[in-house]
Image (cartoon, coloured by chain):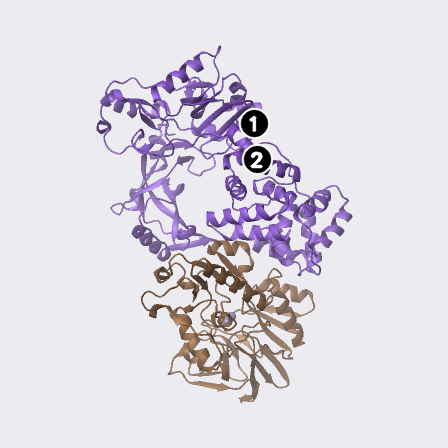
Amino acid sequence: MTQLIESTARGLYCAAGGFHIDPWQPVERAVITHAHGDHARPGSAHYLCAAPGLAVLRARLGEGASIQAVPYGEPIDMNGTRISLHPAGHVLGSAQVRIESRGETWVVSGDYKLEPDPTCAPFEPLACETFITESTFGLPIYRWGAPASVAASIEAWWRANAEEKRASVLFAYAFGKAQRILAGLDASIGPILVHGAVDAMNAAYRESGVALPETKLAIELEKGFDVSRALVVAPPSAQGSPWLKRFGDYSDAFASGWMAVRGQRRRLAVDQGFVLSDHADWPGLNRAIEATGARRVLVTHGYTAPLVQWLAERGYEAAAMQTRFEGEPGAEA
Amino acid sequence: MKRFAALFEALDASTRTRVKTDALAAYFREAHAEDAAWAAWFLTGHRPRQAVPSKRLHLWAAEAAGIPLWLFEECFDNVGDLAETIALVLPPPAHASDLALHEWIESRLLPLRELSEAEQKARLLGYWDQLGGTARFVFMKLITGNFRVGVSALLVMRAIAQAFGVESNVVAHRLAGEWSPSAAFWKSLVDDVHAEADRAGPYPFFLAHPLEGDPQALGERDAWLAEWKWDGIRAQLIRRGEATALWSRGNEPIAGQFPELMADAQRLPHCVIDGEILAWRDDRVMPFAALQKRLNRKNPGAKVMAEAPVIFLAFDLLEWEDEDWRVRPLTERRQRLLDMLHAIAGGTRFRATSPLPAATWEGLALARAQSREHGTEGLMLKRASSPYGVGRPRGDWWKWKIEPYTLDAVLIYAQKGHGKRASLYTDYTFGLWNGGELVPFAKAYSGLDDAEIREVDAFIRANTLERFGPVRVVKPELVFELGFEAIQRSKRHKSGIAVRFPRMLRMRKDKAPSQANTVDDARELAGWENAA
Ligand SMILES: [Zn+2]
Ligand SMILES: [Zn+2]
């Protein structure tokens, strides 16, 4: 088989089409799967993204960036290769990149998940010969519960704290995870406060037509505002910062796929861990791979080696592909 | 099982003592007697023996999860705990189980050990398919024989006391001996505690304050009783009715750890005495390390008892022939204590402290300077006319401790703290020089103020050389003066020494790391000869 996409010093590169996908160094033409920092880096001359992701990508790259947005599924031609972007279900505007050249089809997954998410279009299975997949949670220990039950346990925690007159501080990745949590919440429990980093992404989501409950920017609270029933959504980097002082004797929690493992939960030393990820779990990875019908699977960031070996034992032509993508941020993010 | 799993979750998630106690108390109030008994049994540190060999569990779990063994091992490496790995890799259960905790234990877990391998496997696969999430994890922790959760037995006892409105030391006493987790036991525990209350409980321990400054300020030397401050286990011996009990200051019953004291106690009349349990040989106290071998070890063997023989060095008498003596003056209580102990022919392992004779404060200061030679931590000063107080009122009892040992050491590892300090690097490991390399010799958590903690935290984040899990290896640059109470030989530490109660006295910004102390300095401080 030919190598339609290869990993180069600047990023994943499609020589036939003359473009890079999620390059980690500036290039001429960058196709962006989604606006997370490890996939969308500044400095390239021209960007292409899925239309629903335009506002969030702009928020990341700045007003000056040259960005072309195409609707999901609409093919465009680049040097005779046909490329199209399809929902990956990861975050708002996240896309898989489908590339067709001389009758051969490759799909680059970017980051993806199969669970429903009210803030973005659901993952679309695509048939292809070669599938390039992420593997952030590529071990059988990672199996997500139903998103609705996670949301219910977040609300139960918030409600219990509110009854004890303690603020609930929830650490979640500011782009994607935070909005996914906010979108489903029962806002009648108490006021919802957000950190500046979350607020900036909320604005981009609202601008893109995603409905979010009313939120207040925590630093703009009027004096004497009662935070005792509040839910505070903050990025993991806020953990331990003086910014949290304003919430008094709060209870804290962390929402991440890593919370599935007790040791990782305890290391963060928060009161609660909610297992919620925007990446595919083990059954999800396997289902997605199977649905492509691909014979060849190239595995990027995550538990690359075990997933490659697992797939190879199941008859796939599987190999690891080096990238500089980082997966779901953990404690230090 | 579900409720017990939920309790485990609550205990595991929280670092707040009150939350844990409340969760435990709520569980004990609501649980059926036979479940409460099993829960209390597990939570006070009892464990069933491993029911199924680990090797089989690896194989069967991989099979049930539909993955090859190498992939299961990969998962195990990542998780680090067999029970948790199994709980995570198995698919969600197809069935639900409403079976109670005691049924899971008595009719499922305990019989497993005796079954054939094939039968074990068949049953386990069935059980796995009936348990999800935390319940499966807890069940596997019980099967592998290493169930543990972050509560002390003491906290469990307090929670039971809270749940049933009784004295916690009575609960403690009942749970201390041998008991089997049955509904009958639980009912008797909960019913009898009131009756038990008057029989074997200790008085609240009277505690001394540290003396800062000059003892002259206490007034006339004559008005005070001075004695050595021993570094042992503070304890009360209770002889009432048929009951004989030994309680530590943490209100834990410790009779089981010191059978020779309990045997001798039978020769004492009815009384309650307060004192220190010490490892004692040839009329001298042994290093604390010797006594440590006796701690948390019930029914010690003859060898252990011979290696670390103990005495009870009594300094006060709180009750005499069933009468509360605490309000009487100290001199009167002590006189009765001495008379009582002397009257026992042949003597016992119960002895009385001797007051220090020095007639002036200067003389006492000289005696105090020799504390280390006597194996003590300094002096106790007690007002001769004082009653035995409750708690820690100021003024009558003082501890006049010797100055700590100090060494300058270099910060080499750091780890995040707990609770409120969980986001900051506050747990430090310090190294001393040894042949051109820094070897770890002490860990310290306390002694810095908030501003200093933030400063050190920032330094650590900016100067991390390597990470091992939660531990950061830090550029050896910051020097701290550490204070500690004693130096002991230790085979477990690379430096060959271990120190007691290390704490940070101050940052030595004036010192370069090369100026920090060496392991030889520490050995010299301890008075050992350094090997050439
Ligand atoms: Zn992403
Ligand atoms: Zn990624």
> Quick one: SS at disc 2?
helix
Q: Quadrant of residue A285?
A: bottom right
Residue B496 numbered tag: none
Which corner quadrant holds the N terminus of chain A?
bottom right
Give the class, few, some or many, for how many residues have Cα within 10 Å of label 2's Cα (few <14, many ≥20). Answer: many
Q: Secondary structure at mark 1?
A: loop
Q: Quadrant of residue B192?
A: top right
The kind of residue on which mark 1 rests is Pro
Residue assigned mark 1: B300
Please, which chain is the residue tagged with disc 1 on? Answer: B
The Cα atoms of the two marked residues, 2 and 1, are separated by: 19 Å
Residue B193 percent location from the top left of the image? 56, 35
**Mark 1: is the Cβ under 8 angstroms from ligand 2?**
no
Q: Residue at x 50, y 84 (%)?
A: A51
Picture quarter containing residue B339?
top left
The residue carrying mark 2 is B175
Instruction: Give the x, y percent position of residue B83.
Output: 62, 51
Q: Nearer the viewer, residue A99 or B407?
A: B407
Q: Residue at x 63, y 83 (%)?
A: A104
Tag 2, which chain?
A: B
Q: Amino acid at mark 2?
A: Leu
Q: Colour of chain A?
A: brown
Q: Nearer the viewer, mark 2 or mark 1?
A: 2
* Left or right side of A123 for B370: left
Give the x, y percent position of residue B443: 40, 42
